[in-house]
Image (cartoon, coloured by chain):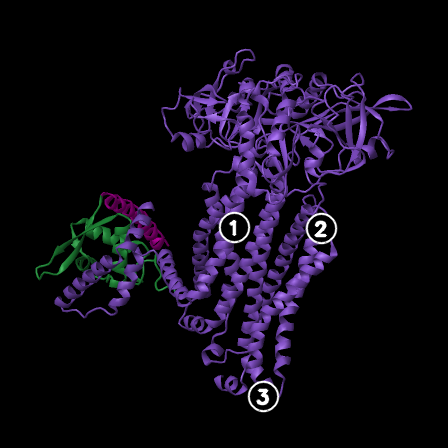
Chain colours: A green, B purple
Amino acid sequence: MPKSTDRGSIGKTGDLIPGTLEMLILKAVSRGRSHGYAIAEWIHDVSETLRVEEGALYPALHRLELKGLLDSEWTLSETNRRVKVYRLTASGRKQLTTERAQWDRLSAGVMRILESN
Amino acid sequence: MLREIRYRIRALFRRRQLDRDLQDELADHLARRGESGRAPFGNITLVQEQTRDVWTFTLLEDLARDLRHALRTLRNTPAQTAAIVLLLAISIGATSAIFSVVNAALLSELPVADPKGLVVLNRLLGNVRVGAFSTPSARELQRQIASMELAASGVLTNPQLKLSADAGEEIPELQTSLVSGNFFQLLGVQAALGRVFTAEDDRYEDPHAVVVLSHQFWRRYLGADRGVIGRQVYLHNVPFTVVGVMPESFRGMGRDFWVPLNMQPVASGGEDARNNTGRSWLAMIGRLKPGISRDQARSELEIVFNRVTPPPPGQPGWKLSVDPGNRSFVYASLGTQYASPLWILMGAVTMLLLVACANVASILLARAGARQQEVAVRQAIGCGRSRLVRQFLTESSVLAAGGAGLGLLVAAGGSQALVSLAPPGSLDVVYSGLDGTVLWFTFVVSILSALLFGVAPALRASRLTIEPVLKGGSRGNTDTYARLWMNRAFVVTQAALSMILVMGAALFAVSLYQLYHVDPGYSTSRILSVPVNTRNLGYQVETGQYAALAQRVVDRLVQVPGVQFASVSAAGFLSQSGRTTDVFIDSEQGRTRVGDVRVDQSSRSLLETMGIPVLAGRAFQPGDRAGAPPVAIVNEQFVRQHFQGRNPVGSRVWFDNERTPAVEVIGVAGDAKLNDIREQPLAIAYLSIDQFPYRFNFINIRTEDAASAILPFVGQAIREVEPRLRPSRIETLATSLDRILSRDILLARISGLFGAMALLVACFGVYGMISYVVAERTREIGIRLALGAEPWEIRRRMVADALKSVVLGLLIGIIAAVAGEKAIRSLLFGVQGSNPYIYAAVAACLILTSASAAWLPARRAGDIDPAIALRSE
């Protein structure tokens, strides 16, 4: 039986640097409780380019929950569907700050290289 | 990290709930996506799987799946599975049983503080260590030795102990240890209840009547009463105060209860042996003072001991040794003689386990052959080899686990049986049942055996080329040959190990046979030997009171119907008791000491009772009474040793010292085994108790025929004459012989059991191998038969095929047995470990049994119907 997935790598978005998706998700959730679809849509709307595939989104959400960076609860939608909504935990907020700082350093560095002659 | 593992393990059990949640979550996503007018996403199942993988514990999940699959597979062949589990249960259980005793007796250290610091003193007599000291010499060593602190401890069997003062029930078969006041402190152990002894309790002048109980005694006879401290128990009718109860873990240094050493006169029922230099019975343990080596302690010990106990004139000084005392076995009075038998049994049972593993391996191999189809299918749909191996190993582990579980029951029963085969005072002192160590051992052994019998079949089964199997052409391919080759290797292994085991069993059996066929010089089955307690009668030896009592006992006993002769004696036959003394004889150089001889002061009728013939001169006569000229009868060995074969009748000898009155030798008796059936003939002089007053310890009775019928009447008659004689047992000398030979009986029985089991298992191995060969070659055999081969020729080839492997195994086994024969040499009697006839007999037996095991499937091979065989392919 072959391994059915490549767990651990962020996945199928391709455009994204590994690890970035999780940061984006944390950022999205930091604005308030939201469900998976809303997170993907928000990322797409704000970025105007990034489309998060479901095959990457849900594993990432569950992984973040497993690590204790996200919390989840079940609510009911207007049409009475069960909806799982995610919320940032304290350690999730801390993680977001760290990743944000790392990202800033990284992108600044990358920019400096690209803009040098 | 921890949180993750916890979460994942929880996920294992909430699997269904989590799956439903995920489904709902994705359904919601899908719905919203639909509402927003975008196309539904591609593969929802794939997303589901990828997400689920985040929280599933693949390893555990696989394991659980493997386990389920293994159980299902094993359930499909219930008979075979049961047979394997049973075989493993017996062999793992037997291994654990022997190990539990080996561990208790030989491996685990004494339950005391700093056991490694303990030493035990031994006298060296040639190569033999004797760890027994007389009370006075023990006392002097304790006082004079500066390099170590010493404590003494001695065992008394059958003390008379009652729990109440009145004529209450006496607890039978007890063992007490008499210990010096510093014994418990030296060991560094505390009582579980109350206190241990102090030096105060063990003053020479005023010892305290106190007793410390063992945990098992307390539980068994006092119902584990926590209020027991301060109550009285009665030792030979003297009240003793219970001051302490030892913890359950305190084993190996005394069995039932402890009494201060200076209470010895009471504990042994009257006789004060505290100044008796002739009775060596105390073990001496010690702790070295800081900075002192064992060697330094030994040199001091030798100097002091030789000063305290001067060697006989003309003999070199005593040699002593200071040995490690951290194992309990050195203190069990009979323990040491069980050390090497236990190791041998441990080796034997390990071999038995290996035989079982080889056998199970070949069964699994054949099974794997039958499951080629399944394996091929699983491989074809992408199951990796490591995954397959894991699956097969899981099955092996399930089998081993089942075997180990049942095996623990076998071990519990087996170890008790083993302990009860050994006489009291040996294994029972140290053994306390299966403990944590044994559980661990069983666990490890089961894992090891699962690997042993599982790995080869698993590797073999998973290495298979898929296409031919799926196409149905499974016969005659390379896999089959490789499997056959492996199967042969297993049969060779089984045959070799069985050869060693059966060989060992045969040697011990022959040895035991020889021991039982040694002529002791008297008939063992018709003589009753009755040890009696004459110490507490308050008689004086010199006044002839004992002689008078002896006469009354003998007169009464001969009136019991069925009793032919009766006599009393100081020493018992086959009881490891007896007295030796110096003997002097007139020679050309004058009156000289010729050495030690055993003397037995007994009734005049002793030789008649025992049936020991008088070969020259005369027997004792009624005239040889007190006051008449003293006479003695000596045995043949005495004549050989001290008279160089001359006729001694009429010669004079002196016992003890040359100033005692001369004793005339009136007769020569036949040689007889005194202590042990193995002993070389000992020189002995028989004296009459009337002329040489002495306290007798045994009553000997010759019965007309089977002794067992009159046992109760004998006891009754003795009690009628003197109730205080308290015969502790009435048994035939045949029973005494059984007890003396209990170690040999134990070895012969258990090694016989192991040998028989190995042989049986090996036969199944041969049977299985040939069955497999026949099954694999059905078509080939069919063709041969169709072409005109004779059925008997086919059968002969099959049996020959089996014997090839067996004989190869036997050769390996014989080489190993010859090389290992040294290990058991010292335990054999009257048979050489290299006796070629026994090898030949055992090999013939193995060849014969395996040929018959091969014959059953071989006969089937000859019965194959060519038409059916060819059509079935």
**The image quarter in which residue B286 lies:** top right
What element does badge 3 sit on?
helix
Name the kind of residue labelled 2 in the image: Gly
In this view, the residue farthest toward the right is: B588
Residue B73 percent across, percent down from the top left = 40, 66
Q: Label 2, label 1: how many angstroms apart (C-alpha)?
A: 25 Å
Q: Quadrant of the C terminus of chain A?
A: bottom left
**Dot 1, how many residues are within 10 Å of its Cα: few (below 14), some (14-19), or many (20+)?**
many
Task: Report which residue position mark 3 lands on.
Answer: B786
Give amino acid for label 3. Ala
The chain ID associated with circle 3 is: B
Q: Which residue is mark 2?
A: B833
Give the numbered dot on residue B94: 1
Q: Which residues are magenta?
A: A90-117
Query: Magenta-highlighted stretch: main secondary structure?
Result: helix
Sooner in the amino-acid sequence: mark 2 or mark 3: 3
Q: Nearer the viewer, mark 3 or mark 1?
A: 1
Residues indicated by labels 3 and 1 sit on the same polypeptide chain:
yes
Please give left or right for residue B309 compared with residue A68 in the image: right
